[in-house]
Image (cartoon, rainbow, N blue to C red):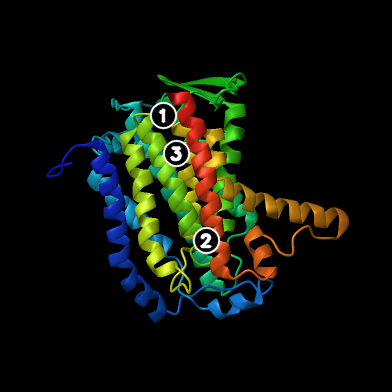
């Protein structure tokens, strides 16, 4: 980074400010474009009736969020090895023989690039989903099987690269309890001069974490400011964790995500003038899971993002219980709709969920920090 002090903490706060500024500058124009093209939210007919007034509100604000994060990361993250990554991805073929490119870059660079990959790839899935909803003018987008297949592919690619080229062990750490080795069931393939380890159990674990978190944040995005505020809080803690583990560039990605959320909330607070859509929510879920993996805080992240876990569990419990008993546990799922049905105002639900997120994120960081000291 040229022209700015190289103090790490300064860079982290600058990333927040830069992403926030880019988001706030671009969103008004994006909102006008969406309104001109009449691209608005399709509200679920079986959702709370008070939400019907949101029909037609511009959506896909996640596009600007991703642009803001990408701009901040590219301007602030140093020594990412983008040229090396490009050469590594564009593997050359000589005849029928696969040739390993002569390129080397640090594991830390690979981790940051992988976090960016997970963010953009999951965001792309969300974008396709949002576009499908708008074209078909219904609240359902991609078919579940298609979405699951794409997310599975993303998680598999992420796992194989993170284990083989980013020095991340296929283990799951539970602070003060144990480190669980999920690499005990592995297959090693030799492709030319490349040695590829496939840790089957860790593949399944990363799949559950990444796909689960992407969908969990998506489920949380049901009220004005709810997903934006909770993600903002969680990303602050993930930035602190990445910084603590000497992964400054990953911390800058998390800080940029936090700043983008702050800028987005200016327009998404009640009553919202734009929604982030699946583009934003799935990108944030993928980013959160990827950061947890590269910082080896997979279990801690479930506490930091506790509100996302709770929202997802409320849906799972509701569906499973209804299939078994034809009765419902909650008045409506996800959980934030349950409290709406109980008479809470939308603003009250959002603020209280923010408070719960702040508490769980604090507990998660304290748990992580207690072992890292």
Disc nearest the viewer among 2 and 1: 2
Q: Which mark is residue 96?
A: 1
Q: Secondary structure at mark 1?
A: loop
Q: Which quadrant: the N terminus? A: top left
Query: Pointer 3: residues within 10 angstroms few (<14), some, or many (20+)?
Result: many
Q: Position of residue 330 (x, y in %)?
A: 74, 60
Query: Pointer 1: residues within 10 angstroms few (<14), some, or many (20+)?
Result: few
In three-dimensional space, the C-alpha distance between marks 2 and 1, rounded to whole angstroms, equals: 59 Å
Q: How many marks?
A: 3
**Residue 81 versus residue 307 in the image, above or below:** above
Q: Which mark is residue 351?
A: 2
Q: Secondary structure at mark 3?
A: helix
The residue sitting at 63% across, 49% down in the picture is 310
In three-dimensional space, the C-alpha distance between marks 3 and 2, rounded to whole angstroms, equals: 26 Å
Residue under numbered circle 3: 291
Considering depth in this image, is 6 or 40 the residue closer to the camera?
A: 6
Is residue 164 in sight in this rendering? yes
Q: Position of residue 139 (x, y in %)?
A: 60, 69
Disc nearest the viewer among 3 and 2: 2
Q: Position of residue 339 (x, y in %)?
A: 66, 64
Q: Quick one: label 1 or label 3, which is nearer the N terminus?
A: 1
Considering depth in this image, is 67 or 263 the residue closer to the camera?
A: 263
The answer to whether marks 2 and 1 mark residues whose Cβ atoms lie closer than 8 Å is no
Q: Position of residue 365 (x, y in %)?
A: 48, 36
Is residue 296 in sight in this rendering? no
The residue sitting at 56% across, 66% down in the picture is 348
Considering depth in this image, is 158 or 56 the residue closer to the camera?
A: 56
- Residue at the far left in the pictured view: 3
The residue sitting at 23% across, 47% down in the picture is 75
In three-dimensional space, the C-alpha distance between marks 1 and 3, rounded to whole angstroms, equals: 37 Å
């Amino acid at each position: 980074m040229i022209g700015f002090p190289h103090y790490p903490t300064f860079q982290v706060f600058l990333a927040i400010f830069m992403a926030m500024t880019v988001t706030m500058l671009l969103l008004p124009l994006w909102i006008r474009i969406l309104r001109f093209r009449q691209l608005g939210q399709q509200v679920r007919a079986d959702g709370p009736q008070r939400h019907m007034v949101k029909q037609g509100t511009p959506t896909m604000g996640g596009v600007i969020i991703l642009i803001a994060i990408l701009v901040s990361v590219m301007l602030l993250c140093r020594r990412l090895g983008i040229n090396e990554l490009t050469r590594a991805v564009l593997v050359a073929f000589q005849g029928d023989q696969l040739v390993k490119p002569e390129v080397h870059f640090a594991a830390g660079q690979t981790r940051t690039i992988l976090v960016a990959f997970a963010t953009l790839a999951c965001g792309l899935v969300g974008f396709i989903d949002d576009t499908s909803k708008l074209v078909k003018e219904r609240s359902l987008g991609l078919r579940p099987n298609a979405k699951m297949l794409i997310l599975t592919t993303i998680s598999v690619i992420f796992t194989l690269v993170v284990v083989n080229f980013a020095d991340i062990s296929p283990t799951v750490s539970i602070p003060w309890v144990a480190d669980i080795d999920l690499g005990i069931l592995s297959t090693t393939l030799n492709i030319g001069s490349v040695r590829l380890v496939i840790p089957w159990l860790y593949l399944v674990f990363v799949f559950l974490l990444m796909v689960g978190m992407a969908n969990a944040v998506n489920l949380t995005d049901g009220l004005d400011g709810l997903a934006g505020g909770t993600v903002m809080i969680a990303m602050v803690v993930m930035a602190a964790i990445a910084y603590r583990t000497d992964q400054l560039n990953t911390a800058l990605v998390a800080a940029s995500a936090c700043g983008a959320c702050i800028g987005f909330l200016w327009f998404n607070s009640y009553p919202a003038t734009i929604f982030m859509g699946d583009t934003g929510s799935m990108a944030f879920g993928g980013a959160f899971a990827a950061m947890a993996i590269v910082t080896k805080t997979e279990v801690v992240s479930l506490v930091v993002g506790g509100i996302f876990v709770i929202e997802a569990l409320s849906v799972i419990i509701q569906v499973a219980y209804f299939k078994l008993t034809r009765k419902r546990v909650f008045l409506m799922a996800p959980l934030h709709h349950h409290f709406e049905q109980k008479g809470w105002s939308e603003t009250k639900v959002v603020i209280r969920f923010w408070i719960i997120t702040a508490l769980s994120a604090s507990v998660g960081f304290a748990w992580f920090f207690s072992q890292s000291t």
